[in-house]
Image (tube, rainbow, N blue to C red):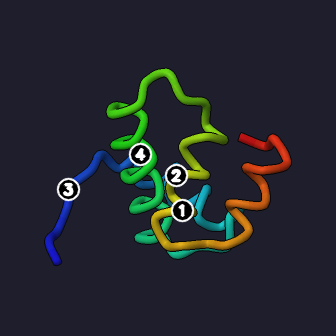
Amino acid sequence: MGIVKIDEALHEEVRKASSAMSRSINAQAEFWLKLGMLAELYPTLSYQQLHLKLLRQVDFKLAEVAHEQGAA
């Protein structure tokens, strides 16, 4: 595990988002990092489609149900 240095203003935004999403600050930053990486790899996909990709990576079964019902 490493240390990532970020701007204080960005850290404050991560802190606020983590509180709203009931995540730790580190978990919120990690979520945004993963989502951002996917967005660069798949620039034509929507947020919902990218989120579904994250869920599929951990074999989240309801992700397939959502996909089948047209949520992605």
Q: Nearer the viewer, mark 4 or mark 2?
A: 2
Separation of marks 2 and 1 at Cα, in angstroms: 5 Å
Q: Which mark is residue 29?
A: none
Q: Secondary structure at mark 3?
A: loop
Which residue is labeled 1 in the image?
A: 56
Image quadrant of residue 18? bottom right
Residue drawn at (52%, 49%) of the image: 13
Q: Secondary structure at mark 1?
A: helix
Which residue is labeled 4 in the image?
A: 10
Separation of marks 3 and 2 at Cα, in angstroms: 27 Å
Mark earlier in primary sequence (3, 4): 3
Quadrant where the image shows the N terminus: bottom left
Residue drawn at (85%, 48%) of the image: 69
Separation of marks 1 and 4 at Cα, in angstroms: 28 Å
Q: 16 and 48: which one is in front?
A: 48
Total of numbered circles in the picture?
Answer: 4
Look at label 2 and name its amino acid. Lys
Q: Secondary structure at mark 4?
A: helix
Question: Are the residues flagged by discs 1 and 4 in contact, CB closer than 8 Å?
Answer: no
Which residue is labeled 3 in the image?
A: 5
Question: What is the x, y in percent for residue 24?
Answer: 52, 75
Mark earlier in primary sequence (4, 2): 4
Farthest residue, direction left = 2
Quadrant where the image shows the C terminus: top right
Q: Nearer the viewer, mark 3 or mark 2?
A: 2
Mark earlier in primary sequence (3, 1): 3
Residue drawn at (52%, 52%) of the image: 53
**Pointer 2 local density, CA inside 10 Å: few below 14, some 14–19, many at least 20:** some
Q: Which mark is residue 53?
A: 2
Question: What is the x, y in percent for residue 48?
Answer: 66, 41
Look at label 3 and name its amino acid. Lys
Question: Are the residues flagged by discs 2 and 1 in contact, CB closer than 8 Å?
Answer: yes
